Image (cartoon, helix red, strand yellow):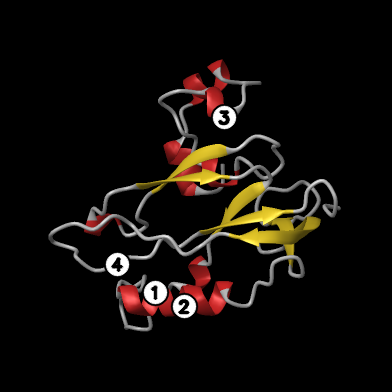
Amino acid sequence: MVHEYIRDSRDEKIEKEAAGKHFSTIKNHEPPCSSDISLFSPISSRITHNDPLDWRNLPSFKEDLEPYSFCARPYGRMFSSEKGVTWESDPEKQLAQLNAYFGVIEEGRSLVSFYTNHGNPLVEEAGDRLLIGAARIVKKGPQLFFPKKADHPDDYPIWSHAITIDHPNTCT
């Protein structure tokens, strides 16, 4: 439970009751790890994107993830260059960073690596990562945007993109 968001957003009672059930059959609950829920599943899932900048109060957005899909989120690219500001809030600058990050992915050619970075039993140092698998990317989802609001009329990009892998064909 190293990640604060996972620790604070989970509902242990509901998760115990839903153990062994596919995510798509659970009503009125979406676990905090839902954006990765279809990665090794032959069944699609519907997830909810929430604005990472809570203060904007943008409406959430629902997305259907195809089987063998997950959402990649380049948080490291979304930091602000403005002193004293953590996250970039300008939607045009956000979109430029997202396009630069996702624009180099080539469907059918690019690979994705899966790794652990906290709490794995094989690596003791907190910053060390452990590679646990790799797969070929067969589809990159489009850039999606949060629904507009009167007080936020700009197109605010969703920071994640759905990525579909060629599982089980190339996943190692």
* Above or below 28: residue 145: below
What residue does disc 4 label? 155
Q: Nearer the viewer, mark 4 or mark 3?
A: 4
Measure the C-alpha gap from mark 2 to mark 4. Answer: 15 Å
> In the rendering, at what x and y percent does residue 18 appear?
56, 20
Is 78 situated left or right of 161 in this image?
left
Is 75 situated left or right of 51 in this image?
right
Q: Earlier in the sequence, mark 1 or mark 3?
A: 3
Q: Earlier in the sequence, mark 3 or mark 2?
A: 3
* Above or below 12: residue 6: below
Is 170 situated left or right of 75 in this image?
right
Q: Residue 113 shows which numbered tag?
A: none
> In the rendering, at what x and y percent does residue 116 appear?
70, 54
Q: Earlier in the sequence, mark 4 or mark 3?
A: 3
- What number of labels is visible? 4
> In the rendering, at what x and y percent does residue 70 appear?
61, 50
From the viewer's side, name the closer residue of 108 and 78: 108
Q: Are marks 1 and 2 in contact (CB under 8 Å)?
A: yes
From the viewer's side, name the closer residue of 65 and 73: 65
- Answer with the quarter of the image where residue 23 lies: top right
Q: Nearer the viewer, mark 2 or mark 4?
A: 4
Measure the C-alpha gap from mark 1 to mark 2. Answer: 5 Å
Measure the C-alpha gap from mark 3 to mark 2. Answer: 31 Å
What residue does disc 2 label? 97
Q: Secondary structure at mark 1?
A: helix
What residue does disc 1 label? 94
Q: Amino acid at mark 3?
A: Phe
Q: Secondary structure at mark 4?
A: loop
Q: Amino acid at mark 1?
A: Gln
